Amino acid sequence: MILLGNFLQVIFTALFWTVILSIIFCTTLLFFRVLLRRRTKQVYSSLWRNQNSQKKPVVVAFFHPYCNAGGGGERVLWCGIRALQRQYDFVNCVVYSGDCGYSPKDILSRAKERFNIQLERPVEFVFLAKRDWVEAKTWPHFTLLGQSIGSMILGFEALWKFVPDVYIDTMGYAFTYPIFRFIGGCKVGCYVHYPTISTDMLVKVKTREATYNNSAIISQSAVLTHAKLIYYRVFAFLYGLAGKCSSVIMVNSSWTRGHIVEIWSKHNSTHIVYPPCDTSEFAKLDNRSDELIVKRVISIGQFRPEKNHALQLKSFKMFLANQGHKGKEIFRLLLVGSCRNKEDEERVNKLKELCKDLDITDSVEFHLNIPFHQLKELLSISTIGIHTMWNEHFGIGIVEFMAAGVIALAHNSGGPKLDIVLKWKEKETGFLASDEEGYSQAMSTIFSMNSKTVENMRLVARESVQQRFSETIFENEFIKHVEPLVS
């Protein structure tokens, strides 16, 4: 009886202190939350004043540290903000940006220049100084975990500087969600372009296949492979817990939704919202490639490892080799994309070195950080649009190809396979390939088609993307799913 009494006393004491510490923790958290909000409203008081609406202002903050990068994710950001401004006169928007070297005017000018997007009203920028923490270079080992920890550090900085009413992540930093939900007391939503980890990545490691995110050193070792599998599974579990903190989840494709639902287990809260594609603007282009002697293959995409530009160069080399001695005179490959930082610039330099090694330097052109009008000009003189990323989450560039009358040649996986390069009214809209030989053969097939066949495919492809993907369709879907957060 004495032992039982002592045991019960220990249990009750533990429960008592657990309750006391929980009360202290919750009180401290509540006090910290109130303090942060009060400080935010003092510094950014104008955001909570609205002379144009009778409704109480709602401040929506978008977490997008690379808002000046000029890629597809940035188009989603600016179109999302514009949609909110058009729909709600009581919503004020804030952007968490890591582009400290640029002024708000510079960033908005680039959005107008690159995407032809003009916002309805001004937005506030909160600049973050700790963006290096989410750079891959900061975490040469255990990069997924390191960047996720880095995103939490960046998230704490963002929350310390500004506490919004609604927090929307548009870059995929899921580990910031619990910070803003539980510490900041914000409503949380997200737009996911690509899951940080997917079951496909686990399969690549398990089958010991060497890729850009699974080095040959690991793939050749059974012990290291097993260790990495454990690491990935633990990370996927934590990633799932973080993702569950978002009450509204928007994803950009069927492929992304499948993986997010599998890991986050929020089936009813996860919605496909295809990214905004400027189909109407590109559809105005008059493709003149048939009239030109020099035939062009164009690639659009940021210079990141997963885009696999090397496969484009090797495929183009194989294609040229099959064209005889006149191939180098007639055909050109145009690599168009934005460079976000020094790492991207180094990748471009390596690609130029690869061109030298393949002896195709004179047949390849690099167009970096070009304005929108120049992009349209290059599309109007190109016959084929090539895209080589494995399991591309969606592929805005591919939609732009099709809308501009450029024959799409994409990777036979992910969004291009499941959502974009599909038959339309029982007719083909483009081509899919997965290796050097497949891409080379597809280029040969396209360039050998007669002008009538090419024109028919262009018309079908243009119609298919205009009916399925557009800025208007995106804005309507975005507002429908964000409405519960701002109402």
Image (tube, rainbow, N blue to C red):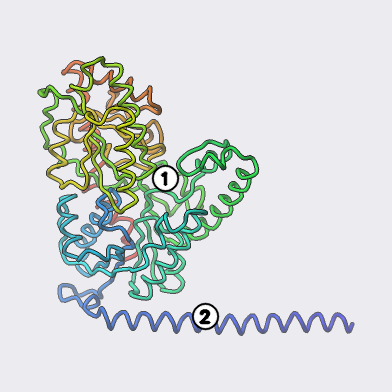
Decide: is 83 above or below 29: above
Q: Amino acid at mark 1?
A: Thr
User: In the rendering, at what x and y percent does residue 107 appear?
Assistant: 20, 60
Which quadrant of the figure contains the C terminus? bottom left
Residue at 45% across, 74% down: 183
Residue at which label 1 appears: 256
Residue at 42% across, 61% down: 247
Residue at 21% across, 32% down: 463
The residues tagged by marks 2 and 1 sit, at their Cα atoms, a distance apart of 36 Å
Which quadrant of the figure contains the N terminus? bottom right
Sequence order check, earlier mark of 2 and 1: 2
Left of 286 or right of it: where is 477? right
State if disc 1 and disc 2 touch (CB < 8 Å). no
Left of 223 or right of it: where is 181? left
User: In the rendering, at what x and y percent does residue 294 appear?
Assistant: 15, 24
Badge 2 element: helix
